Image (tube, rainbow, N blue to C red):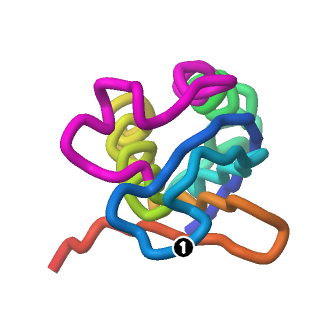
Amino acid sequence: MYELTVDTHFSAAHSLKGYAGDCARLHGHTWSASVTVEVKTLDELGLSIDFKDIAAVLDEIVARFDHRTLNDLDEFAGMNPTSENLARLLFELLYGRIAKDGIRVVSVTIGESERCRVTYRKDDG
C-alpha cells in the first residue's frame, strides 16, 4: 500500500458567525491544503499515480477559493467556513475527481496557520 501526499496553498478571508471572539470579524489566512491518496498497485514504470495528476485536480479545486471571501461562496451557504468544513468540502470534491480503481482519497488536511491544522477522513464505519 502506498500513500501519496500533495500540498498547495491559497489565500482567502472568512468570518465565523456566532463565534465569541476575534474570528467573528472578517480576517484572512494563507491556507495550506494537503491531500493524501492511497494506492494499492504500481504501473509498469513503478508509479502509483502521477503527483502531477493529483496536483492538477487539487489546484483546480482550490482556485475556486483563492483570493475570495469564503462566506460569500455557494459552497458555504448555511454553514460557517471553518477549517473543519473546508477540509470536508475539499475531501468530497477531490474524492469525486481522483478516486478510481485501486486509488482512493484518504484525507485532506487544512491549515489556517503554521500552528493550526485539521484533517478530515471519511468515516467508512
**Picture coordinates of residue 75 (x, y %)?**
31, 32
- On screen, residue 86 versus residue 46, left or right, reads left
**Picture coordinates of residue 57 (x, y %)?**
57, 25
**Picture coordinates of residue 59 (x, y %)?**
66, 26
Residue shown at 62% from the left, 63% from the top = 3
Callout 1: helix, strand or loop?
loop
Question: Was residue 75 drawn as part of the magenta stretch in this picture?
Answer: yes
Can the viewer see residue 104? no
Which residues make up the magenta segment?
Answer: 60-81
Residue shown at 44% from the left, 43% from the top = 90
Where is 75 relative to 36, above or below? above
Q: Which residue is mark 1?
A: 21
| Closer to the camera in the image, 120 or 55 | 120
- On screen, residue 71 versus residue 123, left or right, reads right
**Residue type indicated by callout 1:** Gly
| Closer to the camera in the image, 28 or 31 | 28
